[in-house]
Image (spheres, rainbow, N blue to C red):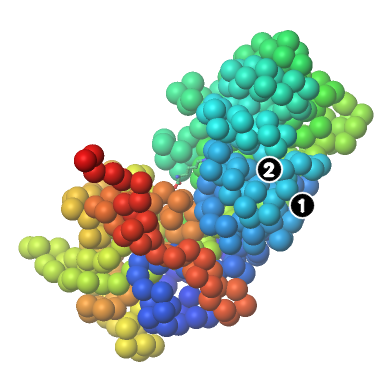
Amino acid sequence: MPTVPQFQTFRTEIAGVSVVDLAAKYGTPTFVYDGAKIVERINDLRKFDVIRYAQKACSNLAILDLVRRNGVLVDAVSAGEIRRALAAGFVPKGEPAPIVYTADIFDREALALCVEHGLHVNCGSPDMIAQLGEAAPGSEITLRINPGFGHGHSQKTNTGGQQSKHGIWHEQLNDCLLIADQHGVRVTGLHMHIGSGTDLEHLGQVCGAMEKAALEVGRTITTISAGGGLPIPYNSSQSYVDLDQYFDLWNAVRNRLQDAFGHAISLEIEPGRYLSAEAGYLLAEIRAIKSMGENKFYVVDAGFNNLARPILYGSYHPMSIALASGETEDRPHQDVVVGGPLCESGDIFTQTEGGFVGTRSLPAAGIGDYLVIECAGAYGFVMGSNYNSKPLAAEVLIQDGQTHLVRERQSFENLIAGEHIPR
Ligand code: LLP
């Protein structure tokens, strides 16, 4: 289990590369990823038979290529993610399935792609079973079960229980086995994902539900997936899940199922945040410093168009300041509100859940200095938007001390591509 970082509020480098050099070379706002950190996190999970990356967390092709080269398989939740996986070199078929399509519906494009490439599908609704059965009889599928309870770092990331639209309700498992039978598909896998950013207690509760469901399905089961949801510490007082304990819980379930069925059961885990969150930094420049009564604001050139988590969930992200002068001495601190450039009052990075503006104690800085928002590698770039006609940020990957531009900053031409004025 990794040691919880002591987050600093002053920095000069990211993964050994000077922040000033990064900003000079690539501009701001830019997401910077530390490739070595992703590999470190992959290695933490090697006890599982399959590490399946939930690419929704960060799906840049270079990141997908990196995880693939490190033996990680991939999950796709849309036609776009299927195409990304293929473009990054994942082959469609294999044992275990290199790409699994996991969703609650098939849109027509995703269904066509799954059939064309013979992808393994993790069905999150009875309708998906029937639709796949009609289009590709004889398929082997996984069922995503909603075990009747869920938990996440916020209600909005809880994916279990009756208020959640996700998965197949646990009491309908038998009906789904009938649907599968009628449509000539075989249920070979079971999957549960109760939420994102949860804790060991809730993650552990899934094991019992999985064992019960697997025994209900019976001997066709060859794979069980623990889903994702592993938390990471966004501040020094939070913690990681004890991975040894977590693995042991799942391994015990797997062993009992192997005894019951008399054949090997493969154990998968499906993390997104755990692999990419801590590797990612959002680099922004301070463009205005102003006071509103008692509040002092650092206004930077990145907003919730780049990192939506604070405004969506009140999420806390560590932040640090890097000085444009390259000075290495920390400065006296002050409490500041950190906001972005968008024409919307909620464009504030220091807000807290339930709170609105919030403040952060950060070193004194000036115009042209840099703000680094940390733990931004999961659900950062991928949830970006063009609000206020802001271009999508650039993305840079650092590997072995080398920087690689892995996504160019979006151009204006690209931003308006596809728009037409009727003549
Ligand atoms: N598997 C399934 C089926 C999922 O729905 C998810 C996340 C994962 C795996 C990966 O979960 P993770 O290991 O990353 O916690 N935008 C939110 C998170 C939404 C997660 C959606 N599903 C956030 O920024 O916290």
Residue drawn where x is 73% and y is 48% of the image: 91
Q: Is residue 13 visible?
A: yes
The picture places residue 380, in percent across and down from the top left corner, at 43, 54
Along the line of sight, which residue is nearer the eye, 341 or 392? Answer: 392
Name the residue type under label 2. Answer: Ile
Going from N to C along the chain, the mark reached first, 2 or 1, is 1
Relative to residue 101, is residue 333 depicted above or below? below
What residue is pinned by disc 1?
47
Residue drawn where x is 50% and y is 70% of the image: 405
What residue is pinned by disc 2?
99
The picture places residue 396, in percent across and down from the top left corner, at 49, 69
Q: Secondary structure at mark 2?
A: strand
Relative to residue 266, is residue 5 depicted above or below? below
The single residue placed furthest to the front in the displayed view is 423
Query: Which quadrant does the N terminus fall into?
Result: bottom right
The picture places residue 70, in percent across and down from the top left corner, at 71, 60
The picture places residue 237, in percent across and down from the top left corner, at 46, 59
